[in-house]
Image (tube, rainbow, N blue to C red):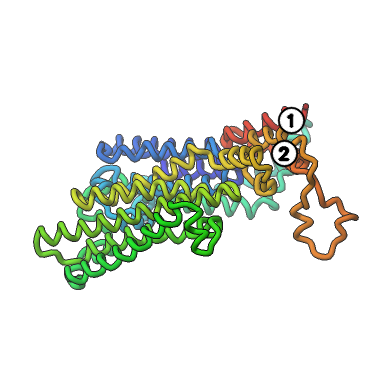
Amino acid sequence: MQTAVFLSIAADWLFYDRPLGISLLLFVSLVLAGLWWNGRREVIRPAKQNLWLLLPLLFFASMTMLRTNSTLTTLNVLAVLCLLAYLAFFYAAGRVTNLNLVGYALLPLRVFGRSLGLAVPVIRPGLQEIRKGKNGRTRLLPLLRGLALALPVLFVFTLLLSSADLIFADYVEELFSLDIFDRLGEWIWRGSLILLMSVLFAGGLALALTRRAEDDEQSPVERGLATLPNHFSIGFIETSTILVLVNMLFAAFVSIQFTYLFGGAANVTEAGYTFADYARRGFFELLTVAILTMLLVLGLNWLSRRANKRQIRLFNGLGSLLIGLVLVMLVSAWRRMALYEAAFGYTELRLIVYVCMAWLAITLAWFLLTLWVRPDRFAVGALVTVMGFLATLNLINPDAFIARQNLDRYVQTGALDVFYLTELSNDAVPELVKALEPTGNEAEEVLLEICSRLWQIDYEELDCYATRHEIIEAELMNRYQVLAEDDAWRRWPSFNVARWQAWGALGFLAES
């Protein structure tokens, strides 16, 4: 219980009303240390087969110290919470690799619910110890009576001592000038959060150190789904019909891709379309088709009845052909996205789609392998690819990458969405500072975004036009002003490499 209270107070101190930084990595380290310490006291050793979870856990926790992109930070925090749930559940027993896709999705919720349930048995002995002494008589009420009797005594002595010493009086005055009543609501709120977190941490530690049986790794939902094929299944002929027809549809689509998209602009023009209009659409639809196809084959593999090895091989062959056609569709989606990006530049969503397509292709390849060898191992591979997707985004540093690529495109083509560029996080500040040089000689002015949102204004009376250089420079100076006025990010729990790099680059720019 003491460890849970300590972790709750630490969480409040590290995170409340403070930007994320090294604080998340420090807090995760404290949680791991508390788990190890309590396990050592209870002579409980961690299951070595699950310790690989520590590597992605510490990686994603450390990324909040390196990146400031809000989307990436949210994904990193969610990854940390999920990995902590996996670690808590499998700390002392079981194998995390034994879960299926539904199990990985539901486990964080199960850990949350079981932590609440296990918290009561952990907290009750502590409360009883506070209320009673060794002889069984309550000591909580005498403590409260003592506090009530002490208050008037302390008040009288404080007045006398304040009159006796001016410096002591200054300290007393400073203490009572802290706007206690104005901040009382905030203190109650923070105290409630600490109490709730203490309950969760107490239950979570109890779950990690007391769970032994491996037969509870599956939730009732998973056990119900596992028995569903016994009550509802699809015959092999029906399954084969579905796969053959979908394969025929996909083959027709793929043949069109080779004829038109991969065949060149001339074939598209002959069909009555421009190559740009034909290519710059459909990537989101194709990405959705790829995901749904994998789910289709998984569902059929789960529900279909196969009586012999010949039927199993035929099913696997049809499924493999379907996945192969989907991989060609992913190449088509990649090419479409590349053409779209070449025309309009990078955005965060387009970059995420790029990375998603690459890791989806790896997932499909893993699915093909497990379909023939170990179907039960697909889920853990899918989990690893999700972590690989997020790790790739972190390593790419999206905002800096987007700024760099769009500025290179500006040098080549002269096209630049300067307003989107200035909305990027502090991760992009070093690249934005570099952008001042290539945009410095540009005389063309663009309509400011704030003016374009206003109706019925006289653009001549208002200063609604500026060069791209002026827009970038004004945004950088505004960021410097914001960072200079807000010192919360400079406290060491909020230490973030990107923010400090931005501060240094902006400071040098302001002085030059």
**Left or right of 64 on screen, residue 344:** right
- The x, y position of residue 51, in whole percent, is 30, 37
The residue closer to the viewer here, 297 or 377, is 297
Given the image, on which type of amino acid does mark 2 rest? Leu
- The x, y position of residue 114, in whole percent, is 34, 56
- x 79%, y 31%: residue: 166
- The x, y position of residue 322, in whole percent, is 29, 58
- x 68%, y 42%: residue: 414
Residue placed under numbered mark 1 in the picture:
509
Looking at the image, can residue 167 be seen?
yes
The residue closer to the viewer here, 378 or 211, is 378
**Left or right of 495 on screen, residue 95:** left
Is disc 2 in contact with disc 1, using a CB cutoff of under 8 Å?
A: yes
Given the image, on which type of amino acid does mark 1 rest? Leu
- The x, y position of residue 337, in whole percent, is 50, 51
Residue placed under numbered mark 2 in the picture:
476
Label 2 neighbour load within 10 Å: few <14, some 14-19, many 20+: many
